[in-house]
Amino acid sequence: MTKWEYVTVPLLVHTTKQILDTWGEDGWELVQVVPGPNSEQLVAYFKRPREQA
């Protein structure tokens, strides 16, 4: 069974693609984007398989 790790990341509207690409290169899969605390910010939720010890 796959075990997952998760992270939440603030996204600025004017740099969204760059931020998403950076996290994707590190193996994180975007799960959801929701509104942030103000109109200039969003919050992204990512997941990736946890490395086996």
Image (cartoon, rainbow, N blue to C red):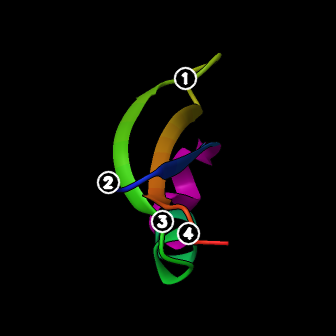
Tell me which label, 3 or 1, sits earlier in the chain.
3
Vertical placement of residue 11 versus 19, above or below: above
Look at mark 3 in the image and give the residue it sits on.
28
Q: Residue at x 54, y 34 (%)?
A: 43
Q: Label 4 crowding class (10 Å Cα cut-off): few <14, some 14-19, many 20+?
A: some
Q: Are marks 4 and 3 in contact (CB under 8 Å)?
A: yes
Q: CA distance from mark 4 to mark 2?
A: 24 Å
Q: Residue 30, how many percent across, how many down?
A: 37, 54
Foreground disc of the pair 4, 2 = 2
In three-dimensional space, the C-alpha distance between marks 2 and 3, rounded to whole angstroms, equals 18 Å
Marks 1 and 2: which is nearer the front? 2
Disc 4 element:
helix
Depth check, front residue: 8 or 39: 8
Residue at label 4?
23
Q: Earlier in the sequence, mark 4 or mark 3?
A: 4
User: Comparing marks 2 and 3, which lies closer to the viewer?
Assistant: 2
Magenta segment boundaries in residue numbering: 9-18
**How far separated are the C-alphas under marks 4 and 3?**
6 Å
Write down the residue under mark 1. Answer: 39
Residue at image position (52%, 46%) is 13
Q: How far is mark 1 from mark 2, CA to CA?
A: 39 Å
The tag earlier along the polypeptide, 1 or 2, is 2
The answer to whether residue 12 is magenta is yes
| Three-letter amino acid code at the position of disc 4 | Trp
Return the x and y of residue 6 as percentages of the image width and height: 56, 45
Amino acid, disc 3: Trp
Kindly identify the amino acid type of the residue bearing the numbered disc 1.
Ser
- Residue of label 2: 1
Could you classify mark 3 by the number of other residues whose Cα lies within 10 Å: few (under 14), some (14-19), or many (20 or more)?
some
